[in-house]
Image: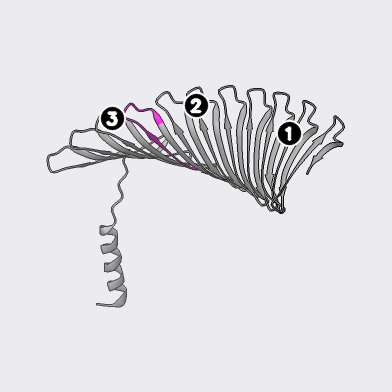
């Protein structure tokens, strides 16, 4: 047999092995003759369906408009999870037994994000990471943010709000040290605490936002000051190098009496 004859025989054998299937649907059956896998192609794109032994569709994979999607269902046909890739990025949705969306995860160009929802479809918690840093927001049943936590360039921050959206508590751990601020319902700062390189300090304010009392511990010892309604210090007490001092000031903050 010549070389050309061998090549012709090999080409005929290859052509016999090649099989092309042209159909709109292809079904795969189990040994009981039940349809378990179905591959379809329609005007929206290709799709793959997988069924359980009860004939319930449990997984569907499609590619429509160049956007692949995978849907997983429970034994009752309720959608439990959906994974998709859209132009903005991939996303994952998970549902409860009633088909309500409870978890959303996305990865966008700015970074990943996570949303947790209640049974009414309200977002109750959000978490994200972007170029600035990471953040967490927790909401009440009306969707109002009540607690916010972030970690950015200057350090971690925590904000807590009331039902009216007023910030009532702020906590921070900055480069200079940790701090705590507490406000009343009118946004007036009533308590402020911080720890700096000079030592801890506590300030108390009145309803007008005026600082009325401060307490600190510095290099030379503890100090406490009490102010009038205008925020002017009127009384100051200190222990300096284990020696107590008392100062009384007039309305212009000039000392009028000291002891010892």
Which residue is identified by label 3?
Answer: 77
Q: Earlier in the sequence, mark 1 or mark 3?
A: 3
Query: In what element is the residue under mark 3?
Result: loop
Q: Position of residue 195 (x, y in %)?
A: 65, 47
* Discs 1, 2 touching: Cβ within 8 Å: no
Residue nearest the viewer, comparing 215 with 22: 215
Q: Residue at x 39, y 25 (%)?
A: 119
**Residues in magenta?**
90-101
Is 66 situated left or right of 7 in this image? right
Give the quadrant of the N terminus. Answer: bottom left
Q: Earlier in the sequence, mark 2 or mark 3?
A: 3
Q: Residue at x 56, y 36 (%)?
A: 148
Instruction: Using the image, determine if residue 176 lies above or below residue 30.
Output: below
Neighbor class of circle 3 (other Cα within 10 Å; few <14, some 14-19, many 20+) is few
Image colouring: one colour
Kindly report which numbered mark, 1 or 3, lies closer to the viewer in this rendering. Answer: 1
Q: Is residue 95 magenta?
A: yes
Q: Is residue 3 magenta?
A: no
C-alpha gap between disc 1 and disc 2: 39 Å
Which residue is identified by label 2?
Answer: 140
Q: Which quarter of the picture shows residue 101?
A: top left
C-alpha gap between disc 1 and disc 3: 69 Å
Q: Position of residue 258 (x, y in %)?
A: 81, 40
Q: Residue at x 73, y 32 (%)?
A: 211
Q: Position of residue 227 (x, y in %)?
A: 76, 31
Which residue is identified by label 1?
Answer: 226
């Amino acid at each position: 047999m010549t070389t050309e004859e061998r090549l012709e025989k090999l080409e005929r054998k290859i052509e016999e092995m090649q099989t092309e299937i042209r159909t709109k649907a292809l079904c795969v059956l189990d040994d009981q003759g039940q349809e378990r896998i179905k591959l379809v192609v329609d005007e929206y794109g290709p799709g793959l369906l997988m069924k359980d032994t009860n004939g319930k569709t449990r997984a569907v994979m499609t590619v429509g408009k160049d956007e692949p999607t995978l849907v997983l269902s429970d034994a009752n046909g309720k959608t439990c999870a959906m994974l998709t890739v859209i132009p903005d990025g991939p996303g994952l949705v998970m549902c409860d037994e009633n088909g309500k969306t409870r978890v959303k995860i996305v990865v966008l160009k700015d970074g990943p994000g996570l949303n947790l929802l209640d049974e009414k479809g309200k977002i109750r918690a959000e978490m994200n990471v972007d170029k600035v840093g990471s953040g967490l927001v927790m909401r009440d049943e009306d969707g109002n943010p009540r607690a916010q936590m972030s970690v950015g360039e200057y350090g971690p921050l925590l904000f807590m709000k009331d039902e009216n959206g007023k910030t009532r508590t702020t906590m921070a751990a900055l480069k200079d040290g940790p701090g705590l601020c507490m406000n009343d319902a009118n946004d007036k700062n009533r308590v402020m605490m911080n720890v700096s390189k000079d030592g801890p300090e506590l300030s108390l304010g009145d309803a007008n936002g005026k600082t009325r009392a401060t307490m600190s511990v510095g290099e030379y010892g503890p100090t406490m000051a009490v102010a009038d309604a205008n925020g002017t210090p009127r009384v100051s007490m200190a222990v300096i190098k284990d020696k107590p001092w008392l100062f009384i000031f007039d309305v212009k903050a000039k000392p009028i009496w000291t002891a010892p």
